[in-house]
Image (cartoon, helix red, strand yellow):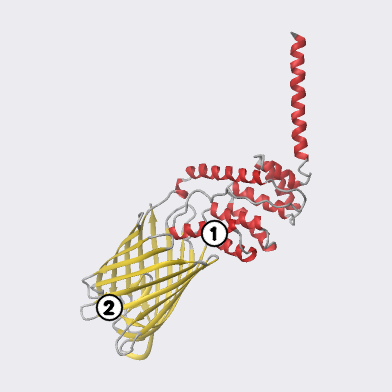
Amino acid sequence: MILKKQLYTTIFLHLFLCWGWAQDLAYQSTGGSIYEKAHYLAFEGNLSSAKKLLEEETTKNGTDTDASALLARIYSWEGNHAEARKKFNRIISEERKNTDVWISAVKNELYANNDATALGLANKALFYLGQNREIERLKELAVQNIRNKKYPPLGPNVGIATSKVSKKGGKRNKKSLEASEKVVAKEKDENAKKKPLEEKEMNNRIGIMNSFMVFDKVYEPMVFSNISYRRQTLAGSIIPRINYNNRLNKHGIQYDLDFYPKFSKRFYAYLNYGYSNASIFPNHKVGGDLYANLPGAFEFSAGARYISFETKNVTVITNSLGHYRGNYYFSLRSYITPQPNNLTRISGNLLVRKYFRDGENFLGVNVGMGYSPELRQLRDGDELLAETLLYIESQRMSLQYQFTPKKSPNIYMANLGVARQELSFDTGNFFWSVTAGITYSVKF
């Protein structure tokens, strides 16, 4: 019996030593470099050891692109998207043709729900690499997220992975890359359940806006305020709003309703109706635009506004051309007011926005000029559309900054504008106005 136990013990120890020798042989077969050892550890699931090796290696040898790229991927898999972004940006700035790094960099932003940044990276990647099916797929995902204004907790479908030959020798294991990224996606899903504040889909929003306008002559200061409720539905966003204005020592309230129906991935619309019985507002206003998403990240719209006063009605034809380029959005919009006797008037606005983390964080500038009907209460969103029924010349510029705190889903927006406008009763004589306001929105 004793001899039998000794035999079993000897066999067990022998098998254990053979298993250890096989693991050591597999470990050494990676080529022996720090990168290859870290690559083996990472795709065996030992991310902490791999990260430690890579951090030491990149500190000593900052030119090791493969080590830096793998370290960035590990940061991304662990949820440290900011550190991953730094690594990816440094590599991309030096190696414009590194397809794997471009793909990983775009995925990192999608993992972090930074869809606008992901779109910008994808556009840059296609500029330097030409056509690439995987990057085009990731770009389309970013565009869809931005259009829907929904940022899903899961990252992109990462089932497709590429492989390349390492500078230090040896071809990366494509199957291990695919398997590892699928595990990462699953871990992200589990982590999303632990962070309801950051990942919870919020379909409701209440906003309060206050704005003041002061003049250098003639007019007294004016006040513009509103409170709105936004509800995201399957048909699109619905926004009822109550506007309050104090102008020329007169108070008035207007009831407003916006609706953004979505027909397909390519087409959606904007519809508006407003009513007021106050003298400083039109009795009725109706407006609408049809938007079409075009190839090349372009967007076109066409529509009209109809404003009804007690003494006269105004019809304005609108159209716009927008373009997403990287983290930037450009939109050129015109307002055409037809009049008899070939007295049609035209005014236009150019909007430029730079997006940061997502579609809720941006810095924008709006510049406009031209002739428009003058009736101060008439506005199209944040844009001054008309001021009175006289046609006057004006130039205007406004700045907007919108942001969300890191630990809160609520939205803050500040705006500052300046305008030079012709006096309606003194042709050729202009006055200056300055507008400042702030909007606070609560999401739930």
- The quadrant of the rendering that contains the N terminus is top right
Closer to the camera, 387 or 26?
26
User: To which quarter of the image does residue 396 belong?
Assistant: bottom left
For residue 21, what is the image quadrant? top right
Q: Label 2 is placed on what type of residue?
A: Leu
The quarter holding residue 318 reads bottom left
Q: Residue at x 37, y 68 (%)?
A: 290
Q: Earlier in the sequence, mark 1 or mark 2?
A: 1
Q: Dot 1: within a 10 Å radius of its alpha carbon, few (fewer than 14), some, or many (20 or more) residues?
A: many
Q: Is residue 141 above or below residue 270?
A: above
Q: Position of residue 165 (x, y in %)?
A: 73, 52
Q: Which residue is mark 1?
A: 139
Residue 273 position, x and y percent, is 28, 67
Tell me if residue 87 can be seen. Answer: no
Question: Few, some or many C-alpha atoms within 10 Å of disc 2 (few <14, some 14-19, many ≥20)?
Answer: few
> Which percent across, then down, holds residue 76?
60, 50
Numbered disc 2: secondary structure: loop
Number of numbered tags placed on the structure image: 2
Give the left or right position of residue 82, taking residue 245 as reference: right
**Residue farthest top in this picture:** 1
* Residue type marked 1: Lys
**Cα distance in 3D space between marks 1 and 2:** 50 Å
In the rendered structure, find residue 248 and report the number of the disc placed on it: 2
Towards the viewer: 224 or 382: 382
- At 33% across and 90% down in the image, what residue appears? 426
